[in-house]
Each structure stands twice: as structure tokens, then as C-alpha cells.
Amino acid sequence: MHMLYDSESFVVVHMQPDAADTPEGASAAASTPPAPQLARHGFEIVDKRSGKEVYLDGSWAEMFQEQILAWQRDTPTQEEVDDTLDGYVGLAQNPVVVH
């Protein structure tokens, strides 16, 4: 989990699949059951103003990744980033309980 952005209005976190924690060749009997792993990467966008979040995965995550790459090339202002993130607020239906 990597925090990519934090402003007064939004937080963006990149969730990535967990790497295998067990070294190769370790005995399966000696190890504990593996922790749950994400099947693929995604992005959590938290709207601090409304207290809601949205999780983007699949094709939504791929489109958002393209937006992040564009931001890295063009270096937008905080206002421009917040305006773009504001477009995702309509998708945010889950209240943030613990963060």
C-alpha cells in the first residue's frame, strides 16, 4: 500500500498485490497459512469532505494509472489534481469507517 496523494480534500492510495512472504524451498508444514492477497492492483480515493471512498480496480484502475502517468509527465497543480479527483466523487458510496 503506497500513499500517492494527500491534500485537504483527497487521499489517494495505491494498493498492490502482496509479494510472497515465504522463502522458496521452505517447508509448507512449518509455515503458517498465507495471509489473504490482492488479486490485482487498485486505487482507493478518499473524499475527506464527504467522508466517503471509492476503490478502483480492473479497467477503472488501468484508466486511473494512465492519469497518474500523465500527472507525472505534466506536473499539474494541486487544484488540477483535486478537480480531476472530484470527478470520481460520484462513484464514492462507501463511508470511511477507519483510516
Image (tube, helix red, strand yellow):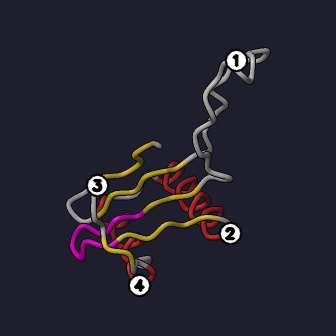
Q: Give the quarter of the image for residue 33.
A: top right
Q: Residue 31: percent from the left, percent from the top?
A: 64, 23
Nearest to viewer (mark 1 / mark 2): 1
- Which residue in the rendered view is the most extreme toward the right? 25
Q: Amino acid at mark 4?
A: Gly
Q: Residue at x 59, y 57 (%)?
A: 65
Residue type pointed to by label 2: Ser
Q: Is residue 25 above or below residue 90?
A: above
Earlier along the polypeptide chain: callout 4 or callout 3?
4
Q: Secondary structure at mark 1?
A: loop
| Residue at numbered disc 4 | 90
Classify 10 Å Cα crowding around label 3: few (below 14), some (14-19), many (20 and above). few
Q: How far, Cα to Cα, is label 4 from label 1?
A: 43 Å
For marks 4 and 1, give the one nearer the viewer.
1
Q: 29 or 47: which is nearer to us?
A: 29
Q: Up-down: is 98 above or below 30?
A: below
**What is the crowding at mark 1: few (fewer than 14 residues within 10 Å), some, or many (at least 20)?**
few
Q: Amino acid at mark 1?
A: Pro
Disc 1 and disc 2: Cα gap in Å? 32 Å
- The secondary structure type at the circle numbered 3 is loop
- Label whose residue precedes the other's in the sequence (4 or 1): 1
Estimate the spatial distance between the alpha carbons at disc 3 and disc 2, rounded to whole Å: 25 Å
In depth, the one of 90 and 97 nearer the eye is: 97
> What residue is drawn where x is 62% and y is 50%?
38
Mark found first going from the N terminus, 3 or 2:
2
Residue highlighted by disc 2: 59
Q: Is residue 72 above or below residue 57?
A: above
Q: Give the residues drawn in magenta, as a range.
A: 45-52
Looking at the figure, which quarter contains the C terminus? bottom left
- Residue carrying label 3: 99
Q: Earlier in the sequence, mark 1 or mark 2?
A: 1
